[in-house]
């Protein structure tokens, strides 16, 4: 089941510094980001082996998740919040704000055979 984690953030009068270190529950092998999204829905899949961590660096978006039993919506609108998506988490992403930048950290390199597109 997908779950949220807080990323360690240091704040002082100069601003914020968020650190991604020893908090992501896997070795990061791939990083990509999504931006400039219109009203389209993204995603629509789960993975056989890849675990992902989603962080909305700017703006906001919504992630729908279904793990085969439970359905949930997660709203990402702070760059210190991170959504962990396990392999059984079939997910879509929508409601992107015009300025949204969604960064995704992945446990595996891209492999088209790793995707399962059929929803539960």
Image (tube, rainbow, N blue to C red):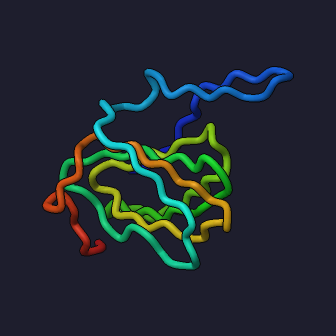
84 or 98: nearer the eye? 98
Residue sitting at 24 percent across and 57 percent down?
47
Residue 30: percent from the left, percent from the top? 32, 42
- Image check: 61 left or right of 43? right
Residue lying furthest right in this view? 13
Residue 103: percent from the left, percent from the top? 49, 49
Q: Is residue 37 above or below residue 3?
A: below
Residue sitting at 60 percent across and 46 percent down?
57
Name the quadrant of the C terminus: bottom left
Residue lying furthest bottom in this view? 39
Q: Is residue 63 above or below residue 51?
A: below
Residue sitting at 33 percent across and 34 percent down?
28
Residue sitting at 41 percent across and 62 percent down?
70
Residue 108: percent from the left, percent from the top? 24, 43
Residue lying furthest front in this view? 36
Residue 24: percent from the left, percent from the top? 42, 31
Q: Is residue 84 above or below residue 69?
A: above
Question: How many numbered discs sit on the rendered protein?
Answer: 0
- Image check: 13 left or right of 36? right
Q: Is residue 87 above or below residue 118?
A: above
The image quadrant that residue 74 belongs to is bottom right
């Amino acid at each position: 089941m997908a779950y949220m984690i807080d990323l360690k953030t240091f704040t002082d009068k100069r601003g914020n510094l968020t650190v991604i270190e020893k908090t992501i529950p896997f070795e990061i092998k791939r990083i990509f980001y999504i931006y400039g999204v219109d009203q389209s829905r993204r995603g629509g899949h789960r993975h056989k082996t890849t675990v992902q961590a989603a962080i909305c660096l700017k703006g906001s978006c919504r992630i729908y998740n279904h793990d085969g039993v439970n359905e949930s919506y997660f709203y990402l609108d702070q760059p210190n919040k991170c959504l962990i998506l396990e392999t059984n988490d079939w997910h879509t992403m929508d409601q992107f704000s015009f300025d949204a930048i969604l960064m995704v950290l992945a446990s595996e390199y891209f492999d088209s055979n790793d995707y399962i597109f059929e929803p539960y």
